[in-house]
Image (spheres, rainbow, N blue to C red):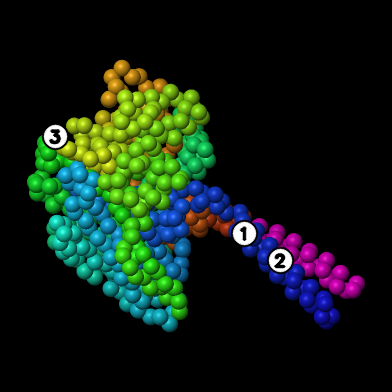
Amino acid sequence: MNHKITKNIRKATLFALLIAVVGTVSFQPLGSLMASSHREAPLISGDPKADGTDFYAFVSPDKSDTVTLIANYLPFENPPGGPNFYSFDDNVRYEIKIDNDGDAVEDITYRYKFTTTTQKGDTFLYNTGPVKSLSDPNLNVRQTYSLTKIQDGAETVIGQDIPTPPSNIGPKSTPNYDKLQAEAVKTVGAVKTFAGQSDDPFFADLGGLFDLLTIRKLPGNAGGGSDGLKGFSVQSLALQVPISELTNDKSRPTDPKAAAAVIGAWTTSSRQSTTVLGGGKASSSGEYVQVSRLGAPLVNEVVVPLAAKDLWNSSVPAGDAQFANGVTNPELGKLLNALYKVKVPPQGNFGTAEARDDLVAIFLTGIPDLTQPPNVKPSEQLRLNVAIAPTQNPNRMGVLAKDNQGYPNGRRLADDVTDISVQAVAGAVYPLFHKDFKPDPLATQLGDGVDKNDKPFRSSFPYLALPSNGYATTSGLDERASVGNSDKDSDDDMGKTIAIAVGALALGALAASLLMRRGSRA
C-alpha cells in the first residue's frame, strides 16, 4: 500500500475516533458542575477534599438528650468515580468546634484525622471481590481515623483506628451497603461517631440560582425547580454528643431561656503550610493553616463578596466584624429588588438605625429569646438552643413557619435553608424586630422550587441517606443521573449515546474515504 495513503488512513481513523469521543462526551451538560453553592470560594474550589459543603446541628429526634452535629466535605462526588473512589484526605485536619459561652471562641473541638492503607499494591482494583464487612480481605483500600476531643487546652484521644465504609460501588462490590454503613457507626466514650460517604443532603436549584438568580416557576414556593445536587454524594462526619457534654455548666437545660441553653458551632479544615511534591509522593510540613470554615448555610456563598471569600475561609468568628457590611447591606436584597421588584427592608451601615438588625440577629448574634446567648459577641456561627425539644411535625421552613426547632435555630437535614434565607433577606423576618413593617407579599413566597432532598433521610443516627451506587448511575451530570430510574431510561440514554457515536464514526469513515482519494491522486 502507498505510504502516503496508509498515513492518511491512520489520520482519518484517529480523526474518526476523536469525533466519536467528542461526540459522546460533549453532550453531557457540564454547566451544573461549574455552578455550585458548595464551591464557594476561589482557593477552596481547587481543594475539594478540604471543602466544607454543609454543616448541621440539631437536637437528635430519637434521642433528645443528645445533639447531632454533621459536617460534610468534598462536593459533587459522582458515584461511578473509580478506580480511585472518594475519601477524606489524610493530610487534612477536619474539626467541629463548639462555642458554649457566646464569646466567639471555641471551647470544645472534635478533631478527625484519617489514615489510608492499601492491602495490595500490585492491583488497580479498589476491591478485589465482594465487600461484605469492613474487615473483608477483598477491601483493598481502607481508611480509618482517630477522634480527639480538645477542651481547656487538653487533648484527649477518644477513639483510634475507627473504620470508614468504602464508597458505594455497586451490587457486586458492595452488595449490602447499608450493613457496611451500620458497621461504621461506633460509640467511643460518651459520643457516637460516623465518618464516610453519604448522599448529599443539601437540595437547591443551583443552576437557576447562579444563573442570575433565576426562579424557574415564580414565585418559587410551589415546586418547578431542578435539584442540582440530586444523585451526588459527599464525605460526612457525624457526631452524636450528650447535651451535658456541650453546655458550659455541664447541664441539660430544659428552659429555652436558661443561660447555658444556646451553643454555637461550626466546622473547619486545615492543612500544613508547606507541601512538597516529588517521586510520586506529597509530603507536608509546618503549622496547620485553616483553609475552610462553615457554620450557617449560604453565608460565604451569597453574603460574603468575592474579594473576601478566601479571607473568610481562613478567618475565625472573633474577627467577623470585618464582614458585617455583607450582612447589613446584602447584595442579594438588591438583586431581589432589581430582578423581582421585591420591596426589601431598609438597608444601611452596620450599627446604624437603618441596619438590617433582623439579619444581624440571624447571622451574627442569634435571635433574642431563641438563639442568642448572654453577653454575645457578634460572630457567624450556627447557633442551637438545646432546650427546645424536637417536634413531631417538623416544617421545612423552620422558624419562619413557627417551628422553633428548625433553622435558624440550628439546622436539620430537611430544613429548606435556601427558601428560608431568600425570604429572610427579602424581609420576612423583619416584622419581628419592627412591628410596623409589612413585608412585600412576594417576600414570603420566594424560593428555588426545590423543597426536599431527592432521597428520604433515615430515622436514626447518622440520619443521612445512603449514597447512590456507581453501577446504577450512568452519569452524575446527566440530570444527576438515572439514579432510581428504570432500565428503560438507561437503555434510552445508551441508545442515544450509541447513535451519536455511530454518526460520528460515519463522519470519520467519510473523512477517511476523502483522504484516501486525495492520497491516491497524489
Mark 1: which amino acid? Thr
- Report if the CB atoms under discs 3 and 1 are less than 8 Å apart: no
Looking at the image, residue 324 sits to the left or right of residue 192; the answer is right
Which residue corresponds to mark 3?
Answer: 257
Please give the count of numbered marks on the rendered protein.
3
User: Residue 472 magenta-drawn?
Assistant: no
Pinpoint residue 460: horizontal percent, then vertical percent: 23, 51
Q: Amino acid at mark 2?
A: Ala
| CA–CA distance in space, label 2 to label 3 | 72 Å
In front of the other: 172 or 102: 102
Which corner quadrant of the image does residue 64 belong to? top left
Magenta stretch: dominant SS? helix
**Mark 2 or mark 3: which is in front?**
3
Residue at disc 3, secondary structure: loop
- Check disc 1 and report the residue beneath it: 24
Residue pushed farthest top?
436
Label ID, residue 442: none
Which amino acid is tagged 3? Answer: Lys
Q: Position of residue 219 (x, y in %)?
A: 46, 29
- The residue at the point 40 percent across, 42 percent down is 304
Name which of mark 3 and mark 1 comes first in the sequence: 1
Relative height, residue 156 to residue 391 (above, below)? below
